[in-house]
Amino acid sequence: MSDAISKFILKEKQDVFCYKLFIRNETSHTIFSRPELIHLIELKEHGIIVQLPSNVCQKGHTLSLFFVETHVELKTRVPDSGPLKEASFTAMAKTEAVESGSSKEKSIAVVELNFTQFDSENWKKILEMISQKQESINKKMKNQHLVRDEE
Amino acid sequence: MSFFDPQDKKNKPILDYFENKIWLIVDNSAGTRSSVKKALTMIGAKQANMLDADNINDAVAMLTSKKINFVLGSYAVNGGFLTSLFSVHMKSMPNRLNAAFFLLAEEENVSDIALGLEYEMDGIVTLPYTGFTIIDTVLEGVTRKITPTPYTIKLEEGRQAFLLGNSDLATEHFSNALQMHTHPYEAFFYLGQIYQEKNLQDQARVAFEESLFHNSDYFRALKNLGTLYYQTKDYKKAYDINFLMAQKYPILPEKIPELIRLSIINKKYEDINNYLKLFSEMKTTDAATQVSLSAGLAVLGKYFINHNEKDKAIDALKAAYKFSNGKYEILDNIMKTMEEGQCMPVLLELFDSTDLSLWGENVQGLYFHTLNHVSHDDAMVISVGEQLLRKKIKDIHIYRGLIERGIKMHRKIGNIEALVLEAIKTFPESKDEFEKMFEKAKVSA
């Protein structure tokens, strides 16, 4: 019993999405290095929808997005130009839509970012990883009903 | 995962099913709520039919005033937890063919899966989602409701009757459902649930066992049967079922104390020794899990005290203290066990090394009792106790300790009487005890 309990209780919580996001705003020449304030909501075929502080970008801005694996610490700050070497995936994106937060969340915005330059194969792998995690959870919920559903 | 094409004619039943259904999205983040609502329009949900709430109270108000078909939300929301909406939703929409409940989860948290299974939620949507993942998860959750079989319809009629309090009609429906599927494990389970509610334990046990005969993986039957075995003191079977569950499914942390008790009752010595090693070496985890571990370690500590393994008892109780997060009931349990095991000086050291102002005020009463038990310095103990009373921390241990010390120090009878009267006023159920103490005070005055 103790082994069975430890299998679950001692398991570290894992993020569904194993990356943190750093943003360089190429239009306003600013850098946002607080990934803990960026809340990823949706991953689209060619972009993402995120919630972040409202001063990070405006509609029409061009951004460099650096996806760094969660456990990786940056050795230096995000550079003013060029690549971020710790990033596993990088994309250039355009800010297509900005929705301001509610009256209770005035300092945040929900932003739709469309990729303009990115490695599509690499992004597909990330989307596939998300799909697989979701499938794994769905299986855990549904496997107990195979006997019923197969009839 | 498949791409859902709303233009494909074969998907029309799905679009029809969702067309006029009402959704409630519950999450602290306006961005998440807005984005989820847009994603759901792909399966025919209408924005006009989508409500949202960023706190539990508003969500409850909406669920009780409107017929909301689907709830989708994150576990921890302003003002409470999503699971508190479950019973409200069931009451509002007892026919579950037109209702579903989904959890939004940001982490691969085994507790979320355990919660999903426990409440028989219709799915867990992980964040961030893709268009496919959210749609596929919702569709998987409601597929059998869109085109239900006669068995499913009968089951849901039974559940509706049960939720509306008509257990006789529910029993009739579930009994009929038994004939409608080769493996009617759910029908057996729901019958078992009715018997369990009526305290017909033997019948409930038989029903749950039948359910598991048809499907040995059915979580709810495993869980309820485990509980029933425990309640009827069939501890070996309770252990075996819980062991089976622990191998197949995530464990809710609150189960830990019960599982430890079962290991103790069933003399699983390897488990018992492993628990102490495992839990003591744990790194930080969330507060709820810590408190459950603490309660479990307190059970372990008591076991070791009862078996004269004092060193292991102290290790277990120290670890229990560490994880207690200041929870009064657990600390009280630890204190009683330490008192039994004559280890109160250890507890006093633990209290002295803790900033008790970070915990609830009532814990100070336990601290006082420990101090009173250990210290030979009457004046100091009385001073601490009186300070706590001045701060309005009215714990029964404080009154007891101050009266006992007052008697010992031969304080003026008037002072002791005032304390006794205040104690009786605050704890009237202990009137006899305090009156006896006062009699003793008068004799020794």
Image (cartoon, rainbow, N blue to C red):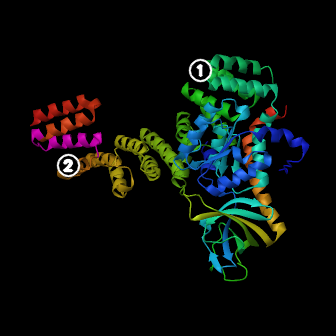
The residues colored magenta run B393-414
Residue B440: name its quadrant. top left
Residue B198: name its quadrant. top right
Residue depicted at x 61% and y 42%: A1
Q: What is the distance, in whole Å, between disc 1 and disc 2 at their CAs?
A: 53 Å
Element assignment for label 1: helix
Q: Which residue is mark 2?
A: B382
**As rendered, which of B340 and A59 lies closer to the eye?**
A59
Please tell me how crowded label 1 is: few (under 14), some (14-19), or many (20+) other residues with Cα within 10 Å.
some
Left or right: where does residue B46 sit relative to residue B297?
A: right
Residue B231 lies in magenta, yes or no?
A: no
**As rendered, which of A28 and B257 lies closer to the eye?**
A28
Element assignment for label 2: helix
Question: Is any part of residue B276 visible from this angle?
Answer: no
Q: Which residue is mark 1?
A: B201
A106 relative to B251, above or below: below
User: Residue A151 shows which numbered tag?
Assistant: none
Total tally of numbered discs in the picture: 2
Amino acid type for the residue under numbered disc 2 = Ile
Q: Position of residue B240 (x, y in %)?
A: 64, 33
Mark 1 falls within which chain?
B
